[in-house]
Image (cartoon, rainbow, N blue to C red):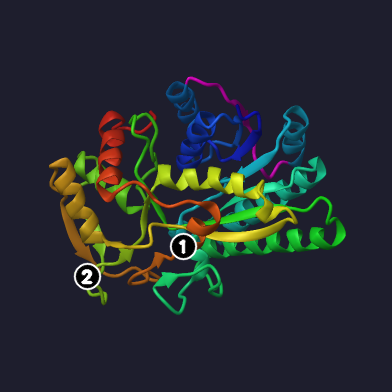
Amino acid sequence: MNSQTVLVTGGAGYIGSHACVELLQAGFNVVVVDNLCNSKSEALARVQQITGKTLQFYQADIRDPLALANIFEQEAIDTVIHFAGLKAVGESCQQPLRYYENNVYGSMVLIEAMQQANVKQLVFSSSATVYGEPPSVQYVEHFPLSPINPYGRTKAMIEDMLRDVSAADQLVKPENPWKIALLRYFNPIGAHASGLIGEDPNGIPNNLMPYVSQVAIGKLAQLSVFGDDYPTPDGTGIRDYIHVVDLVKGHIKAITALQSDKFAAGGCQAYNLGAGKGYSVLDMVKAFERVTGQTINYKIAPRRAGDLAEFFADPSLALQELDWQVEKTLDDMVADTWAWQTKNPQGYQ
C-alpha cells in the first residue's frame, strides 16, 4: 500500500481531476488545492465516487502564500503535481498580464512554499507550446524553446525557473536536491471511461474535441475549421492527440522515476507526453462521425494567426526513462468524449 501524499494544484480541473482518480487508485493520499476559477468542485465529488476513496480539498489560490503555508503545515506532503494555471492560447494574447500573474507568479509562490516546507519533488504540467516553431515537425526535448504566444511563454518561464532552482540546490544543498519532471503535453482529449468526469470548458470551448462534441449534441451550430490550405494531406492542421487517462498515467510514472536512482542526485528533466503521430482536424471530425454515428456540421474558415501546419511528439525519452507510452486509441478518445458529453450535456451543472 502506498502511503505517500501528493498535493495536486488545480486538481478540480480537466486534467487534474483525472490525475486524482489515477493517484487514488494507485494508493496515494491526495490533497487538492484549487481556486475553482475554471473548474467545479463537483468534479472532485465524482472522483471520490469513481474511486470509492476520499481526498482532502482546500479551496485556495496558489498565489496566496499563507494558504499554501497552512496546507503544507496541515498535510504531510511528499510530492506536488502542479496543474494550476490558465491555459487558453487566444485568451493569453488578449490578457497577457493575467497569464503572467496567474501562471508565473503563482508558480513562484508555490515553489517558495515547497522550499519552506522542504518538499522538493515536483511534477510540472508544461506544454508543447514551449517549442514555438522548431526545426522539425516531430518535437524532441533538446530543441530550443521559442514559444510564440504568452501562454507558451509562461510555461517556458516556469520551466526556466525550475531549472534554475534545481541547479542552485545541487550546488548549495547537494544532500537535499530538487527532483523535478517537466511534462510537455501535446493535445489531451477524451474523458474517464465512466463518463462521470471530463472536460467542462467555461463558455465556448477553445479546443477541438469539446467543440466537436458540443456540435454533435446540438449545443453549438457548427464547427469552424481554421484553414484547409496547409501543406498536409487534407489541407487541415495536424496535431498529436493523447487520451487524458494516458496523460495522467505519465504523471504517476514520473513520480516513480523521481524516487528512483536516476534522480538520486536531483535534477530537472523535461519529457514529451504525446502519441508520436498526428491526426488532422478532418481526421478527427471523421473519426467522431464514425464512432458516434452523429453528423458534424462544419465550415472552412480562414487560418488563425500563429497556428502551425503540423506538429507531434517524439515520445521516446518518456518510454526510455519513465517506462510510459500511450495505450488508448483514437476510437477510445472519441467514444469516451461522447460518453461524457451525452451523460453530461450541460457539463457539471
What amino acid type should be assigned to the residue bearing mark 2? Answer: Asp
**Residue most toward the right?**
172
- Residue visible at 71% across and 35% down in the picture: 77
Q: Which residue is mark 1?
A: 316
SS at badge 2: loop
| 264 horizontally vs 29: left or right | right
**Disc 1 packing (10 Å; few <14; some 14–19; many ≥20):** many
- Number of the front mark, 1 or 2: 1
| 133 horizontally vs 192: left or right | right
Q: Is residue 286 above or below residue 220?
A: below
Q: Which mark is residue 342?
A: none
x, y percent for residue 293: 12, 42
Q: Main secondary structure of the magenta part?
A: loop
Looking at marks 1 and 2 on the same chain, the residue that comes earlier in the sequence is marked by 2
**Circle count:** 2
- Residue visible at 68% across and 52% down in the picture: 261
Q: Which residue is mark 2?
A: 228
Which stretch did the figure color magenta?
Answer: 52-64
